Amino acid sequence: MSNIDWKELFLSILKSFDEEYVFNILKKLTSFGGEFGFRLAGTQTEHEVANYIASEMEKIGLDDVRLCEVPVKAWNFHEAKLIIKEPINTEFIASTYAGIGGGEAEGEVVFVGTGTSAELDAIDLTGKIALVDIDYDVIPYLDIVAKEVSVRGGVGVILSHISPKRRYTPLDDTLHTADSDYDPSLPPLIYIRRADAKKLIDSMKSSKVYGKIVIKATISDNIGYNVVGTYGVDESIITVTAHHDAHFWGAVDNASGVSMLLAIAKYLVENDIRTKHKIMFISFTAEEYGDISTPFGYLIGSHAWVENNKELLDNVFLNINMDALGYFRGPIGILTTPDLKRYVVGTIEKLSQHTEFGFSVGYKPSCWNDMWNFVRSGISSIHFGCRGGSSYYVQYYHTNRDTLDIISMEKMHDTFGVITYFILDVDSRGRDILDYIELFREIHDCCMSYGECKELSTLAAEVIIRDLNKTCIDEEYYDAGKKILSTYFRLAGWYPTAAPKPFYVEYIEEIKLLEKIADAIRENDYDKALSYAEKINLGKWAKHVSKETFYYVWERIKKPKNWGKYNMHKYFDVYELMSKLKSKTLTINDVNNLILDRRENLLKEAEEIHDLILELKSCIK
């Protein structure tokens, strides 16, 4: 195929799209799971799905098709409901969150706003069930609000997205779910539709409302399955990945990605494409929930794969990941590592002339999908799917409305053409597509952010300038580049609910805010000092919770055992800082010690990047 013009190749791929095959795969995958459709890791449903995918890979003709075991917590959801006993007998269907076991709670239902400590303190929650207008920008973890209700004597929690115009606003008639690291000791927690929540709030205006939460769900130790099949025989590998587990029916998230993975494999086999690289197709388990012990209890299937295949990873040149394809609104979304920026932009500029859909491209890999475990292993990656601002993530994501009717087969057609073209083009061009100049520029911007790290900034700039004359990527240079990629995104990556910003930004902001706090204390203006403290990292939610809940959640965050431990910012006790400011007992010396600690952590992590840049610099001839 190397002699075929790019346009001719792309148009021939588009013509080869087997719409009937893709639709049948979508239909089959979304038929698993019975009444609610969950196909989460380790459940019987997920085992059936994994076996089905393996059988399709074998029918297609992929080599070495196998199931790879992944230890997980299997969450089996059976039913959730809210039974209202007064003022009228009625029943609301409900959902709950993966990781929450079965249980019941009964009592008066009271509305508590967004569930902040100030709102909860205004209500006697003893023996009551709290109805919460959940806002993830205020309370990012489910167990925060549940713990707050519990310490005040509450017996149950009902969540719903009641207020409009938030970042995440499911439709009125939808049920919502997500992954959870929920502590079994916390009260039963359910989610009800917005329309039903509004009915309850209206009823409370004229009389007390009494209800009963019922959850039927189980959690057990089990295994999920990654499904692997290969095409081609070369030692150098391109991985093409998606995940098959899902909340509810998960048509977009992510039956779409699995159907595309199988369709691409089928295209390669049927057309007897001769590839220069081995193409390894992997359908991951546990991209969604898989572990109750950590806030990072997702991406476990891909985490297990990279951890169990360290030697094989040395041969993986590139990862192409697919998650949430074909949504009927918006452009085709792409996320890529910076070293592929020029290649991706140049490619879509050509392809966009022959597709009905535009492109939305981002250059920061995301820790919300399976590309992350490849990136933190130093593997350049391209991810295809809905981008974060898509209305899919506002209205349909992780709801029971994620069904086949929101998938556009026309968009699946074009997406198939785009991804397949990328795979064949990447296979043909190999490492020539890598552009470490862009990665160096990214690192340079990071280094400049340190301010005081002048040596690091100068060195990064020098590497960029010298690399402009680099005409080839040899093995030593490539290996050093992978180390840089891995380390930079481990340190500069971010986890929105735990570390709202990359580590270096947080450290610098903390230092500046602590300096302002010190100045305010010198002026004896503790109110101003407190206003600065509330802007510091965990202060985003710490200011909304009790001391007991803060320490409870903080301890759970500090002990993740999965991939999250690789990119956690080293926090200090913001709650103690705010408490001392409120009591006016915080001294200048206390603040100076915190500033020194922040500077030491910043420089320590900066030096790690500095040393790796030196290693890469030595490879430039």
Image (spheres, helix red, strand yellow):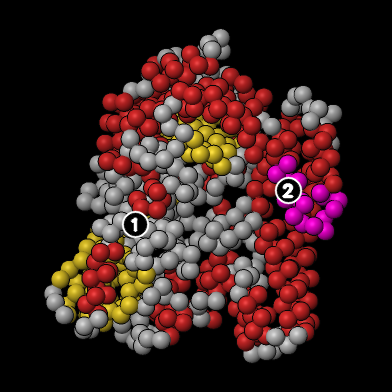
Instruction: Answer with left or right where residue 175 lies relative to residue 345.
Output: left
Q: Which residues are drawn in magenta? A: 441-457
Q: Earlier in the sequence, mark 1 or mark 2?
A: 1
Q: Is residue 556 magenta?
A: no
Under mark 2, the amino acid is Asp
Q: Disc 1 on helix, strand or loop?
A: loop
Q: Is residue 589 above or below residue 102?
A: below
User: Which of the numbered marks, if any, corresponds to residue 417?
Assistant: none
Instruction: Answer with left or right where residue 497 lies relative to residue 63.
Output: right
Distance in Å between CA atoms under marks 1 and 2:
37 Å
Position in image of residue 585 (x %, y %): 69, 89
Q: Is residue 138 visible?
A: yes
For the residue pair 479 and 498, the one nearer the viewer reads as 498
What residue lies at 27% left-to-right and 62% top-to-bottom? 193
Q: Is residue 343 above or below residue 218?
A: above
Dividing the image into 4 quarters, which one contains the C terminus? top right
Q: Quadrant of residue 473?
A: top right
What residue lies at 63% left-to-right and 70% top-to-bottom? 536
Name of the residue lying farthest toward the top: 3
Q: Which residue is mark 2?
A: 445
Q: Disc 2 on helix, strand or loop?
A: helix
What residue lies at 84% left-to-right and 45% top-to-bottom? 459
Q: Which residue is mark 1?
A: 170
Instruction: Answer with left or right where residue 231 lies relative to residue 569.
Output: left
Q: Is residue 199 above or below residue 74?
A: below
Under mark 1, the amino acid is Pro
